[in-house]
Image (cartoon, grey):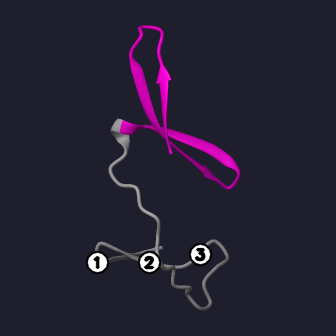
């Protein structure tokens, strides 16, 4: 989701917002490099509860 906010000077600031774990987060759009939705998350057997799984991101395996 992209949100626009008008500042006091009359310029417009754009933010990318996301709800994660019930909390709303926002970053200036100039700080965002990529936005993606993982297609498939592979579970890791015997991993700790904090590890949801791994995915392939541009040829690299990331948790």
Is 46 on the left-hand or right-hand side of 56? right
Q: At 60% from the left edge and 84% from the top edge, which residue is drawn?
A: 47
Is 19 on the left-hand or right-hand side of 60? right
Task: Check disc 2 and report its element: helix, strand or loop.
Answer: strand
Q: Residues within 10 Å of mark 1 (few under 14, many from 20)?
A: few
Q: Which mark is residue 46?
A: none
Q: Which mark is residue 59?
A: 1
Instruction: Name the residue tied to disc 3.
Output: 52
Q: Mark 1 vs mark 3: which is more N-terminal?
A: 3
Q: At 34% from the left edge and 37% from the top edge, which residue is drawn?
A: 30
Q: Say if mark 1 contacts mark 2, CB within 8 Å.
A: no
Where residue 53 appears, as percent x and y from the top left, is 54, 79
10 falls in the magenta region: yes
Residue, far right: 22
Q: Does 29 sit above or below residue 46?
A: above
Task: Check disc 1 and report its element: helix, strand or loop.
Answer: loop
Q: Main structural element of the magenta stretch: helix, strand or loop?
A: strand
Q: Nearer the viewer, residue 57 or 16?
A: 16
Q: Quadrant of residue 55?
A: bottom left
Q: Does 59 sit above or below residue 36?
A: below
Q: At 42% from the left edge and 10% from the top edge, which residue is drawn?
A: 10
Q: Nearer the viewer, residue 46 or 53?
A: 53
Q: CA distance from mark 2 to mark 3?
A: 10 Å
Q: CA distance from mark 1 to mark 2?
A: 9 Å
Where residue 22 appears, as percent x and y from the top left, is 71, 51
The total number of labels drawn is 3
Q: Residues within 10 Å of mark 3 (few under 14, many from 20)?
A: few
Instruction: Name the residue tied to disc 2.
Output: 55
* Residue range (magenta): 1-29
Q: Quadrant of residue 36?
A: bottom left
Task: Check disc 3 and report its element: helix, strand or loop.
Answer: loop
Q: At 68% from the left edge and 55% from the top edge, which residue is drawn?
A: 21
């Amino acid at each position: 989701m992209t949100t626009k906010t008008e500042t006091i000077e009359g310029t417009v600031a754009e933010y990318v917002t996301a709800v994660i774990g019930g909390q709303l987060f926002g970053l200036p759009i100039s700080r965002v490099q990529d936005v993606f939705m993982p297609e498939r998350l592979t579970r890791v057997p015997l991993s700790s509860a904090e590890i949801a799984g791994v995915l392939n991101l541009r040829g690299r395996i990331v948790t």
